[in-house]
Image (cartoon, rainbow, N blue to C red):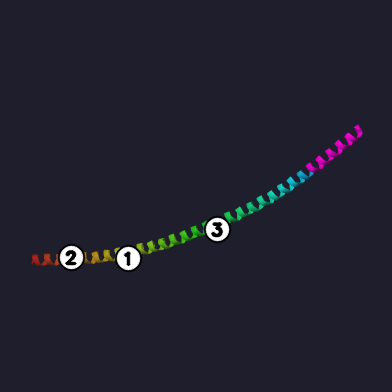
Amino acid sequence: QEHEKLKSDLEENQQMLLHAQEEVERLVKEQEDAQKEVDVLTDEIKIIKTRDQASRLQILQKNVEVNNQELDATRGAIATRALEMEALKQLHGAEEEDLRKALASIQASNDE
């Protein structure tokens, strides 16, 4: 009878061990599946970050292009202003020369 009890306990322990082993295998499989999901999500995050960086890079490139266009326009305006100033200087110089000649002429006629 004790032998039967021991045999029964042994069988029960073996069943519990089998269930525990099955549970461990199931949990290991769940862990593997979860790790695969983590890996997939990590890859997706990397792709999104890369896209996001590419998107930011495109925005920065557009901003640089716009700034370069504004810079070119400003350079053009500066060159135009420089030419206008040069023309005004020449005009002012010519007017000054005409005024000097007129003044000299008036002084010459006054001297006579």
Assign the N terminus to one quadrant of the image: top right
Earlier residue among tags 1 and 3: 3
Assign the C terminus to one quadrant of the image: bottom left
Secondary-structure class at tag 2: helix
Earlier residue among tags 2 and 1: 1
Please rate how many residues cluster around mark 3, counting C-alpha atoms within 10 Å: few if below 14, some from 14 to 19, many from 20. few
The x and y percentages for residue 19 are 79, 43
The x and y percentages for residue 91 are 25, 66
Answer whether labels 3 and 2 touch (C-beta < 8 Å): no
Q: Any magenta on residue 71?
A: no
Q: Any magenta on residue 9?
A: yes
Residue where numbered disc 1 is placed? 83
Quarter where residue 53 is shown: bottom right
Residue 105 located left or right of residue 53? left
Magenta residues, dominant SS class = helix
Residue 66 located left or right of residue 84? right
The magenta region covers 1-20
Q: Nearer the viewer, residue 33 or 55?
A: 33
In the rendered structure, which amino acid carries the disc numbered 3?
Ala
* Dot label at residue 99: 2
In the rendered structure, which amino acid carries the disc numbered 1?
Leu
Residue at 19% over, 67% down: 98
Residue at 71% over, 48% down: 30
Q: Please tell me whether mark 2 or mark 1 is closer to you in this view.
A: 1
Residue where numbered disc 3 is placed? 54
The x and y percentages for residue 18 are 81, 43
Q: Nearer the viewer, residue 63 or 38?
A: 38
The x and y percentages for residue 92 are 24, 64
